[in-house]
Image: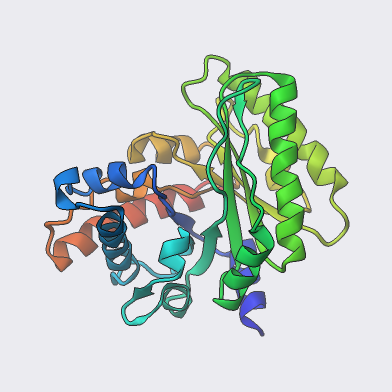
Amino acid sequence: MTSDAKMMAQMVGGAGFIAALDQSGGSTPKALAAYGLGEDAWSSDEEMFGLIHEMRSRIVTSPSFSGQKVLGAILFEKTMNGQAGGKPVPQALWDRGVVPFLKVDKGLEDEANGVQMMKPMPDLDAMCQDAKAKGIYGTKMRSVIHDANADGIAANVDQQFVFARQIIANGLVPIVEPEVNLKSASRAECDQLVLDNILRNLDALPDGERVMLKLSLPVEDDLYAPLVAHPRVIRVVALSGGYERDEANAKLSKNRGMIASFSRALLQDLRADMDDQQFDAALGNAIDSIYAASVCNG
């Protein structure tokens, strides 16, 4: 069986969750601050990205971080191109049984019609081919929905699927992520519009084309069950969206068939000044709790 086939089998049927390790330029200082490193710890963007890479390398080389509970990990481009434990990061992950994904979006446009669309991605084909050559299985791209504007949400989801088809054509599996802002005053209506527009786009996909979905935990439990069951969906994963881990896990456990793809909720107890044993213990506790929430609702 090829690596691609093994990765697909793991994503379709494996028990566990996806770690989101893809903080980019805008969110890196916040991630480092939570890790115990303030802005006085670096004096340039290069040093800042060096520190976040050290943190990610420490995570992916920790004993508790393996494919037994972590099905996949989403990487920032600089992380994909770096090393962990003396190996290229995608190889280091797959050697541990963790499927590597790459964040490909270039950030968000300003809000209009209640949503933030993704910025153009003129180099997407080249980025996908580079990622494929480095052992990456799939991609992730994020847009954001703030208000229940039907036209805005339709355009937002449609944009995701246009890029998704381009990614599929490059031999990778796209994670489509139209995030609903948890602070939205019209969250429940946003959730329903997201569901309707994703179903419309899924039904229009040609035979053989499949995607993964990364969605905010819905106001109504099990709202996304039709997506979990859809033949063109490989997996539906949930983002934590700012919830603390315990709350995110509790909400996830009420949505059958969804698994976690948490970032802050996974990393919230990790600190730079921990020794390796403390670090792995904290990471292992987080992994165990997120894994439990991801498998108890199948």
Residue 192 occupies quadrant: top right
Q: Does any portion of residue 172 appear in the rendered image?
A: yes
User: Who is closer to the viewer here, 139 or 41?
Assistant: 41
In the image, residue 209 above or below residue 263: below
Q: Residue at x 47, y 73 (%)?
A: 90
Position of 151 relative to 120 (above/below): above
Question: Which residue occupies 31% across, 78% down?
Answer: 85
Q: Judge left or right: residue 148 versus residue 205.
A: left
At 70% from the left and 59% from the top, the residue drawn is: 167
Outermost residue toward the bottom in this view: 1
Left or right of 196 on screen, residue 182? left
Furthest toward the front, the residue is: 44
User: Residue 117 location in percent, x, y?
Assistant: 62, 35
- Check the picture and name the quadrant holding the N terminus: bottom right
Q: Is 203 left, or right, of 161 in this rendering? A: right
- Between residue 36 and residue 73, name the one nearer to us: 36
Judge left or right: residue 279 versus residue 143: left
Nearer to me, 183 or 133: 133
Nearer to me, 29 or 206:
29
- Is residue 262 positioned above or below 95 on the image? above
